[in-house]
């Protein structure tokens, strides 16, 4: 029932009406551990941490379009989203399907600049994937 949930549901509704297959995935209640920076994922193609990220990563890898939705806290994306992005390192060397990445963000601040740092944080992640924009 959050603002982010409402916007994500409306986006999903529009995509479904346009004929796309859509799966909504919430990070609420998910076990997402912090990246420990061991780079094992770059050598082995999988993370050594055991949590909900492996299932999420499989869905991200196979999605053609990804729409991230986040509240903006202190002019940045929420911590759960940033932690997930950090943990998606194993995707770098895979044949991922996603090409188009979008962000929907909500904030208590009315100024458009409130979203810039959150957008830039996601753009930094997108920039690591040559086939995505």
Image: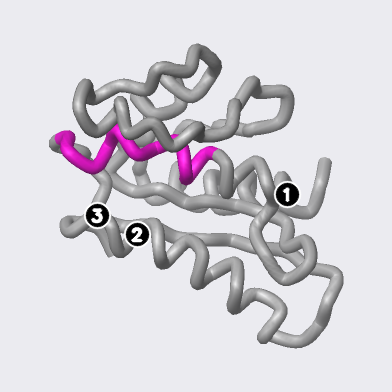
Query: 64 or 130, which is in the foreground?
Result: 130
Identify the main secondary structure in magenta. Answer: helix
Residue 21 highlighted magenta (yes or no): no
Q: Which residues are magenta?
A: 84-94
Query: 68 or 11, which is in the foreground?
Result: 68
Q: Is residue 28 left or right of residue 68?
A: right
Q: Position of residue 122 (x, y in %)?
A: 47, 61
**Res 28 → quadrant:** top right
Q: Residues within 10 Å of mark 1 (few under 14, many from 20)?
A: few
- Residue bearing the label numbered 1: 6
Q: Position of residue 24 (x, y in %)?
A: 54, 34
Q: Earlier in the sequence, mark 1 or mark 3?
A: 1
Q: Position of residue 30 (x, y in %)?
A: 65, 23
Residue at (40% x, 17% y) in the render: 48
Q: Is residue 41 above or below residue 98?
A: above
Query: 61 or 120, which is in the foreground?
Result: 120
Is residue 38 among what the camera can see?
yes
- Marks 1, 3: nearer the viewer: 3
Q: Kindly indicate whether the residue at mark 3 contacts the one at mark 2 (C-beta within 8 angstroms).
A: yes
Q: Position of residue 118 (x, y in %)?
A: 60, 67
Element type where label 2 sits in the image: helix
| Distance in Å between CA atoms under marks 1 and 3 | 29 Å
Q: Is residue 69 left or right of residue 89?
A: right
Q: Residues within 10 Å of mark 2 (few under 14, many from 20)?
A: some
Is residue 62 among what the camera can see?
no
- Residue bearing the label numbered 2: 126
**Image quarter (top left, top right, bottom left or bottom right) of the N terminus:** top right
- Residue bearing the label numbered 3: 129
Residue at (59% x, 26% y) in the render: 33
């Amino acid at each position: 029932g959050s603002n982010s949930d409402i916007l994500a549901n409306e986006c999903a509704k529009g995509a479904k009406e346009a004929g796309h297959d859509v799966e909504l995935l919430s990070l609420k209640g998910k076990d997402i551990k912090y990246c420990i920076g061991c780079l094992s994922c770059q050598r082995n193609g999988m993370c050594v941490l055991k949590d909900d990220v492996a299932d999420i990563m499989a869905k991200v890898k196979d999605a053609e379009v990804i729409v991230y939705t986040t509240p903006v806290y202190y002019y940045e994306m929420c911590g759960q989203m940033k932690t997930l992005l950090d943990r998606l390192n194993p995707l770098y060397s895979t044949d991922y399907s996603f090409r188009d990445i979008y962000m929907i963000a909500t904030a208590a601040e009315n100024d458009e600049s409130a979203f810039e740092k959150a957008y830039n944080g996601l753009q930094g992640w997108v920039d690591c994937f040559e086939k995505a924009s």
